Amino acid sequence: MQQVPFPLSPSLWAATAAAPPPTQPLAASLQADVLVIGGGYAGLSTALHLAERGVNAVVLEAREIGFGGSGRNGGQVIPGLKYDPDALISMFGQERGERLLRFAGSTADAVFNLIDRHAMDVPHVRKGWIQGAHNADALRIAHDRAAQWARHGVDAQPLDRAQVGRLLGTDRYLGGWVDHRAGAVQPLSYARGLARAALNAGATIHTDTPVTGLTRNGGKWVATTAGGPTVSADRVVMCTNAYGGDLLPGLKTSVIDANTFQVATAPLSETVRAGILPEGHVSSDTRNLLLYFRLDHQGRLLMGGRGPFREPKGQADWAHLERVMLKLFPQVAGIPFEYRWCGRVAVTRDYLPHLHEPQPGLLVDIGCQGRGVGLQTSMGRAMAQYVATGDAGALPLPLSPVVPFPMYGLRRLYVNAVAVSYTHLTLPTKA
């Protein structure tokens, strides 16, 4: 599996997370009903829900729990998908589209319910998500988006410029909308909480155990690990997202593994903090390469967005986010930045999560599209039901073939060029 170095300094989440449950590398070959590859949200949720069904599930994680995107994201728990309700129904038809909407709309519930049910040591807040509109066209789309969700019974409202300014603490957006289902978690603590819950339910987790090969032998799947021991299982669920390397031919080139960068300030004073996201919302905007920001549980302001495709070379690779934060929130001028980190995300061709079954008994889940915390938690529950029962109706999306991006190398160069240009983005003028 792909080996990715840690950023130049520990992330905010690594510095403030609850301790992980004790795990060890795989020391001896074993057998399982289901092998789960990847110790992020999807893999851990799958293992948890399988174990609760009495299925013998083994998780193999190449590094540590939450090493990939599950431990490096912004921690925003946003329900839904990249497409609006009307578009999803048009794409999938009324019956499947409505079912997909119910699934996508409940993903935030899944996260907060698990935190409560398992008494996880996870700082969290659920005050809603605001999407700020960066231009007039985006404002029309945002207001229509709110209306569509409202027609499906969601507590969502359009916001004008003054409302967004008051709730965000910046006057750089023209308006937007609010979705009260959303919230935020300490993302690495949540991954570790899922792992602890899965272990308590009877699952087995081995960390620092990269899977180097996956073959079919005598009706069983056999996973070879870098240390030598193997795991033999009836079924395999692969949940490596942007960190899967070349374990499954063609999977790596079916997504663009873009880098998302984040910075965090020192804790804000009570006076400054009172004027930024004062009611506890989280936010991301309407740009194609969006900005996203929130306060953490210790009062730091976080700002995230795209950066260079390559791994970072120095603090200058985060400078554009620091500039943007000061433009959006000039009230934080003079407050030092304490943390800078990044992680990979998997962008699919159609901006939807993908489920593949390239061979019988091998299920692959890939693609988060900025909704990973809730989406992959819920996807794990759905995949566990499918693997345990064989009921394809448990899956929110139809199984699809693995299809590489056409001219993958050129596509990757294009995405990198867009990301570089994004570092020079401008903001709407002040009111």
Image: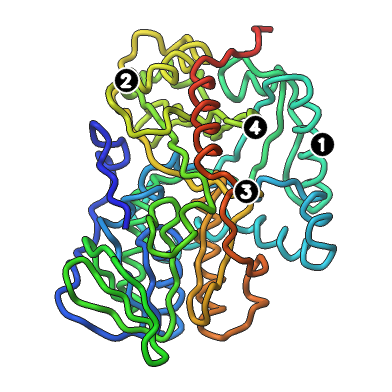
Mark 3 = which residue?
A: 349
Q: Position of residue 200 (x, y in %)?
A: 31, 74
Please tell me how many numbered marks the rendered image carries: 4
Mark 1 = which residue?
A: 144
Disc 3, disc 2: CB below 8 Å? no
Callout 3: helix, strand or loop?
loop
Residue 94 is drawn in which quadrant? bottom right
Q: Which amino acid type corresponds to the residue marked 1 in the rendered image?
A: Asp
Mark 4 = which residue?
A: 131
Colouring mode (rainbow / by chain / secondary structure / one colour): rainbow
Left or right: residue 346 versus residue 152 is left
The one nearer the camera, 272 or 135, is: 135
Callout 1: helix, strand or loop?
helix
Q: Position of residue 4 (x, y in %)?
A: 29, 46
Dot 1: few (<14), some (14–19), or many (≥20) neighbours within 10 Å? Answer: some
Tag of residue 337? 2
Dot 3 or dot 1: first in sequence order is: 1
Tag of residue 364? none
Q: Which amino acid type corresponds to the residue marked 2 in the rendered image?
A: Phe
State which mark lies toward you, 3 or 4: 3
Q: CA distance from mark 2 to mark 4?
A: 24 Å
Q: Which amino acid type corresponds to the residue marked 3 in the rendered image?
A: Arg
Dot 2: few (<14), some (14–19), or many (≥20) neighbours within 10 Å? Answer: some
Dot 3 or dot 4: first in sequence order is: 4
- Residue drawn at the location 42% of the way across and 76% of the way down: 236
